[in-house]
């Protein structure tokens, strides 16, 4: 019984301190968005230039090819247990500026509430109720060119809403900033997420009966507090190669993620700064069909024999573009964790232009 209650409290994400800096706070915003990007292992901050730039790199919105673009994604993880959705619209404000509005939803539905599983000393399964744990982000983006040739800048303002059934929730606020620089066939990017730290204010609304049930089972009563998400920085470089006189192109990109929220199990790890590299490739034919691959999330894993190895997360993807409509699919973590660990990502993009 205690294990069930403890699992329930873990879903609540209770924070008992007034302010905490958590290593994986708002981690749903770091999963990744879009079939193209996820097919390339998330290594797209320098090359992305469409409506999905509102997530990856707001400065990339300046490369928008249409007057208006609409994008949407659905991603099922852990055999459909978790649903990850994204929607966005980007629009040109002028020749030198672009705006976008987007939202992210990551949720687990149908979580059993076992607080009242016991009745008169007996297990009564009919008393089990379910709830959802859902994270939302509402983002406003703006990008602009500068007087420096090849340099674009952009920023996000994001509002976070996290909901755990009827028990509690949080409101948060954060800012991202980014810059792109194009030099000949090379593209370089810098993205700073949560540059001022993102603040989540938690509040719990539990009934007196709920509190009694928690105390009776030896669990603590969750209290509200302030949760901080520390800055995260990404540097990227990409180049597009035309393969001879054929109709084939090859886009390559490498990214470095820098995190500052404590030691992580990544390639370069320390208590002050961690560095996690990602690489991605995109083979295109006549700008119509694209085959993609990526590799990242490198971790040191200790086997049962005590030997350590470096393990990463590969991804594969396929994209089709017909006129102003693009359909992209990605298979994340394709070889590491079997069917349960796979992530199927499908996204669409539609461009709309004024006539005449």
Image (tube, rainbow, N blue to C red):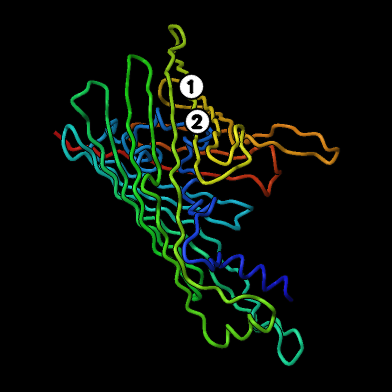
Query: Which of the two discs, 1 and 2, sits closer to the camera?
Result: 2
Q: Pointer 1: what residue?
A: 252
Residue 97: image x %, image y %? Answer: 20, 36
Q: Nearer the viewer, residue 268 or 316?
A: 268
Residue 68: image x %, image y %? Answer: 25, 41
Residue 65 visible within the image = no
Q: Residues within 10 Å of mark 2 (few under 14, many from 20)?
A: some
Could you say which disc has been placed on residue 24 in the image? none
Q: Secondary structure at mark 2?
A: strand
Left/right of residue 96 with respect to residue 60 in the rendered view: left
CA separation, marks 1 and 2?
14 Å
- Looking at the image, residue 198 lies above or below residue 43: below
Left/right of residue 153 with respect to residue 192 in the rendered view: left
- Looking at the image, residue 342 lies above or below residue 275: below
Q: Pointer 2: what residue?
A: 256
Q: Residue at x 58, y 77 (%)?
A: 221
Q: Residue at x 76, y 34 (%)?
A: 308
Residue found farthest to the right:
305
Residue 37: image x %, image y %? Answer: 47, 36
User: Disc count in the image?
Assistant: 2
- Looking at the image, residue 280 lies above or below residue 219: above
Q: Residue at x 37, y 44 (%)?
A: 195
């Amino acid at each position: 019984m205690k294990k069930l209650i403890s699992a329930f409290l873990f879903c609540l994400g209770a924070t008992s301190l007034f302010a905490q800096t958590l290593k994986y706070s708002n981690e749903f915003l770091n999963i990744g968005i879009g079939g193209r990007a996820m097919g390339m292992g998330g290594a797209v901050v320098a090359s992305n230039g469409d409506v999905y730039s509102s997530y990856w790199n707001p400065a990339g919105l300046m490369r928008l090819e249409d007057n208006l673009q609409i994008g949407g994604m659905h991603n099922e993880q852990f055999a459909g247990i978790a649903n990850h959705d994204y929607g966005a619209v980007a629009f040109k404000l002028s020749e030198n500026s672009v705006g976008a509005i987007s939202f992210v939803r990551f949720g687990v539905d149908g979580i059993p509430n076992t607080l009242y599983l016991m009745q008169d000393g007996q297990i009564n399964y009919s008393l089990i109720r379910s709830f959802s744990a859902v994270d939302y982000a509402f983002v406003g983006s703006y990008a602009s060119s500068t007087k420096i040739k090849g340099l674009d800048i952009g920023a996000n303002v994001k509002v976070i809403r996290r909901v755990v059934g009827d028990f509690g929730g949080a409101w948060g606020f954060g800012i991202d900033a980014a810059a792109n620089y194009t030099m000949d066939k090379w593209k370089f990017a810098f993205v700073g997420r949560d540059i001022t730290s993102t603040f989540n204010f938690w509040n719990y609304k539990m009934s007196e009966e709920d509190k009694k049930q928690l105390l009776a089972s030896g669990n603590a009563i969750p209290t509200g507090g302030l949760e901080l998400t520390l800055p995260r920085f990404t540097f990227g470089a990409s180049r597009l190669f035309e393969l001879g006189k054929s109709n084939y192109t090859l886009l390559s990109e490498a990214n470095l993620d820098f995190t500052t929220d404590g030691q992580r199990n990544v390639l370069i790890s320390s208590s002050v700064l961690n560095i996690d590299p990602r690489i991605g490739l995109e083979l295109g034919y006549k700008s119509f069909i694209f085959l993609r691959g990526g590799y990242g999330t490198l971790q040191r894993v200790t086997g049962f024999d005590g030997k350590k190895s470096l393990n990463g997360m590969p991804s594969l993807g396929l994209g089709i573009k017909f006129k102003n409509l693009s359909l992209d699919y990605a298979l994340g973590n394709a070889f590491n964790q079997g069917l349960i660990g796979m992530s199927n990502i499908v996204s669409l993009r539609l461009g709309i232009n004024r006539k005449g």
